[in-house]
Image: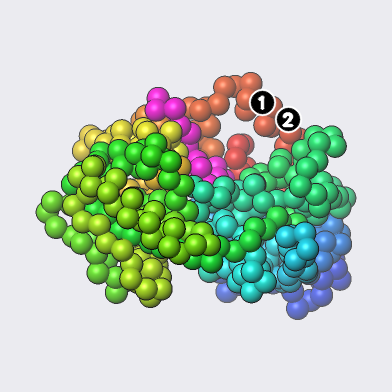
Amino acid sequence: MSALSSSHIEQFKKIIGETFVFTDEEVLNNYSRDATEKLQFLPQVVLKPRTAQEISNILIICNQDLIPVTPRGGGTGLSGGALPWLGGVLLSTERMNSIIEVDERNLQVITEPGVITEMLQNAVNEKGLFFPPDPASKGSCFIGGNIAENSGGPKAVKYGVVKDYVLNLEVVLPTGEIIWTGANVLKNVTGYNFTQLFVGSEGTLGIVTKIVLKLLPLPSFDLVMLATFASPDKACEAVTGIFRAGFNPSGLELMDIESVKIAATKTQTVLPVTDEIEAHLIIEVDGNNEAVLMQEIEQLSQLLEKFDAKEILLANDSNQKAELWKLRRRVAEIVKADGFTIEEDTVVPRAELAKLIHGIKALGIQHNFRAVCYGHAGDGNLHVRIKKEGIENSWQNAEMKIILTDFFQLVKRLGGTISAEHGIGLIQKGFLEIVFSRKHIELLKDIKHVFDPNNILNPGKVFD
């Protein structure tokens, strides 16, 4: 990689305007972090382009002179994907923040990548339409970042993840060409599926500048209930039982009691916390017939009693529902502030979830750390946050590498993998060989080389 010069800075100013080229220390510092652990890497310049053509012109220069470019959305990532660890250009998409069209006839939306996810959801909701993926950071993350990480969230259990809604993408390649990856249609087998290749590619293959998403009709009603259990085993058995009984919840979230206790101290939500309770399940159902949903809730309550649920509580109104989901969405930031700075994003077949929880707790005893567990029980995606005295970051820490190697090997034995929705990014790339063969990794690198022959775009992410 090459260093930036004053000449490069002047070229960037001509492309996007002097107002949107930043080299002052305060701005560089603001863009030197994302939500990953407590890591910081300073870029040499922050650029805020407005159009695909401006990005193209920037990338042509960077590709020619071998300058690293780190794309950035809302900065909420948890695997270091937006960290400019090699310096160079930090390219923010925040000015590309327009919803171009809500197509009510075809149930589609065309948007730029810098739109905040919740704002996009609200905009289509006003039209009676629905974009289901809802990551915990939806109030601040960008839809472009959701594309880069193939985000999910609680509703993935019923509705799927971001990849299930992306129809077409406008992308600027590292070499400067601008392409559309597919077509604005529901079925397409014309050539290789470039659209899905870019979804989840973590900003390593191209920079997304326009997005075409499929939408659904907005459900009219939803009901939320909370169930408590004496052990994670019973809670996880209940999760499997819910699906075996034919239910299709729109949310099915698990929190262990330690994460509940920590989160409850920072919110107004009052949750059952006793010596007999070790796990909570949040269960949501949605649809267009409230009476049918009430009947479904009653049937779910009867089912949960068979799994020794201690308490079963129904949120009585929209405020209670909102508070319950607010606690679940905020649990990550709250436990991080409490010292649980290292987060892993593993996924196993949901019937193996209890073994995964017991496994990480056992490793905690073995290696002298504390762990809290919460996540999307309905699809086996467990978020684990680790607190190890004296260690804030897993990145390049020998002791944490031993711990995480043991943990990821457990995940692999249970039939899972090391990331479900946060990505590999910077901090997980050293563990890919646990879940992938050498040939698999070679093929990934070959794909990267085809799109980015000079390795300028988010270099060092996913693999070296």
Q: Amino acid at mark 2?
A: Asp
- Compared to 442, does 290 lie above or below? below
Query: In the image, residue 48 lies at what x, y percent?
Result: 72, 69
Q: Which residue is mark 1?
A: 442
Q: Quadrant of residue 214?
A: bottom right
Q: Secondary structure at mark 2?
A: helix
Horizontally, residue 129 falls left or right of residue 157, namely: right
Horizontally, residue 196 falls left or right of residue 331, namely: right
Along the viewing direction, whichever of 181 and 110 lies nearer the viewer: 110
- Compared to 15, does 157 lie above or below? above
In reply to whether residue 421 is colored magenta, the answer given is yes
Furthest residue in direction left, as rendered: 275
In reply to whether residue 322 is colored magenta, the answer given is no
Query: In the image, residue 236 lies at what x, y percent?
Result: 31, 41
Mark carried by residue 107: none
**How far apart are labels 2 and 1 at the CA level?**
6 Å
Check if mark 2's residue and mark 1's residue have beta carbons within 8 Å: yes
Q: Which residue is mark 2?
A: 446
**Please, what is the dominant secondary structure of the magenta stretch?**
loop
Query: In the image, residue 362 lies at what x, y percent?
Result: 24, 35
